[in-house]
Amino acid sequence: MTTAPLPAEDAPSDETPSDDTQVPLLTQPADGVPDVVETPEALLRTIEALAAGTGPVAVDAERAHGFRYSQRAYLLQLRRAGSGTHLIDPIAFGTTDEAGSFVAADLSELRRAIADDEWVVHAASQDLPCLFEVGLLPTRIFDTELAARLLGYPRVALGTMIEQTFGVRLLKEHSAADWSTRPLPADWLTYAALDVELLVELRDALAAQLDAAGKREWAEQEFAALVAGAGAPARRRTDPWRRTSGIHRVRTRRGLGLVAALWNARDGIAQQLDRAPGRILPDAAIAEVAVASTPGRDALRRVPAFARRQAKRHESDWLAAIEAVTQLPETELPALHLPAEGPPQSRVWASKNPEAASRLARARDVLGARAEELDLPVENLLTPEHVRRLAWSPPAEITPASVDAALVAAGARPWQREQTVDLLVEALREDEVTHE
């Protein structure tokens, strides 16, 4: 592998906690940067090479978050001992349906070549959905980011972990690039290949640490849960338009109706064009029109964002959305507030339900102490939302069996329940003891 000293004038990024400007920089893969696989013949050679390799398979994906509406993969990187690194363009293998919409590639033949092997992924929850879209669903994974969290590493970005483990630095300047760009620049391909260059070696180092810490079984349960959920449809948030930035300024139901209508119009346009919604029209512009005293063409044209080329070409869509809302009777407009799903925000518990607030405080205290003992983040010990729901509405009879059943229903893993059930029973029962 080729390294170069980090220039003295370059400050460390968020990915690299070290202040040592002499940490060598990994600049080229050991075997060079392979050609991008974009033909059936090249894909077949890649499949054969990966099948002939040995050991775990390092897998990574590059998306175009912030540029495209979809979260599809625009480049796949795979590396395996005896096989080398492979860069695959999944877009080249996609098709177009009768309506002109892009249909994702089917790379299930590639999956079959490595399906029985462990896939090594960093931050698998980000990559598994786009891998699944092209038919690449693993049977087993090792998530190096999640393993690092379970081991108590304070910073778990790939660049940080590579530096701490191997004493070399990865540049991350292309992590937020528009990977839908074609052709992909040469330096981007180098960056992509380096992302899997040491991933299997990092897996081996972390696996040894998990074994030494007695946490290997915990990690296996977490990895299995990620695989099990990879193909599940994403849960759509109720009224996603309510998360529009600046919506706090909107104080009327008709104003909320305008936010909803403009947000939905933008979402439809963005999906059709496969562009990030914010690149068509920023949230702030939607909120500004929604608070206008007389929304309409004049109000639109007073907002600079609507005059930009991408938004202006859809002016008729914005006006149609506004007109539809102005015709709605008050009873058909969105409610100012949605009924809460689950417990309310914790900050109001003390006034709404003091006993629940006390239970939550005690549960957080004991779980925080246990997490510190185990040297891992408390949110990995037990999902905070599980704790909130238990504290707000505990079982009628608080026993180890009833608390365990509640955690099972919430999706907690066996190792989490083993570490937390007794603590939660004690924290939830204290009110009972006090009242006797």
Image: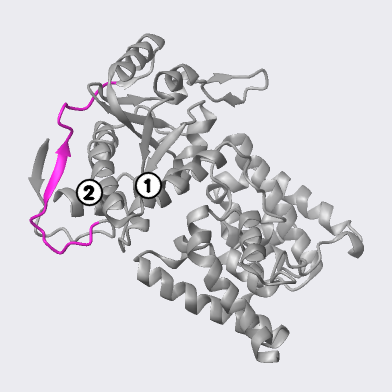
Which residue is at a point 59% across and 62% down the rendered structure image? Answer: 284
Query: Which residue is identified by label 1?
Result: 176
The residue sitting at 54% across, 70% down in the picture is 422
- The one nearer the camera, 13 or 425, is 425
Residue at 76% from the left image edge and 66% from the top image edge: 338
Residue 380 painted magenta: no
In the rendered image, which quarter contains the N terminus?
top left
Q: Is residue 163 visible?
A: yes
For disc 2, the neighbor class at 10 Å (few under 14, some 14 to 19, many from 20) is many
What's the mark number on residue 356? none
Q: Is residue 219 above or below residue 91?
A: below
Q: Whole-Å distance between the Cαs marked 1 and 2?
A: 19 Å
Magenta region = 16-35
Q: Position of residue 58 (x, y in %)?
A: 32, 34
Q: Which of the two residues, 68 or 384, is positioned nearer the viewer here?
A: 384
List the single residue furthest toward the top: 41
Q: From the image, which quarter does the C terminus lie in?
A: bottom right
- Where is residue 109 drawn, in percent x and y? 46, 16
User: How many numbered callouts?
Assistant: 2
By secondary structure, the bulk of the magenta-drawn segment is best described as loop
Image-based side of 197 in relation to 64, left or right: left
Secondary structure of residue under mark 1? loop
**Which amino acid type corresponds to the residue marked 2 in the rendered image?**
Ile
The residue that mark 2 highlights is: 162
Q: Earlier in the sequence, mark 1 or mark 2?
A: 2
The answer to whether residue 3 is above or below residue 415 is above
- The vertical placement of 425 against 77, above or below, is below
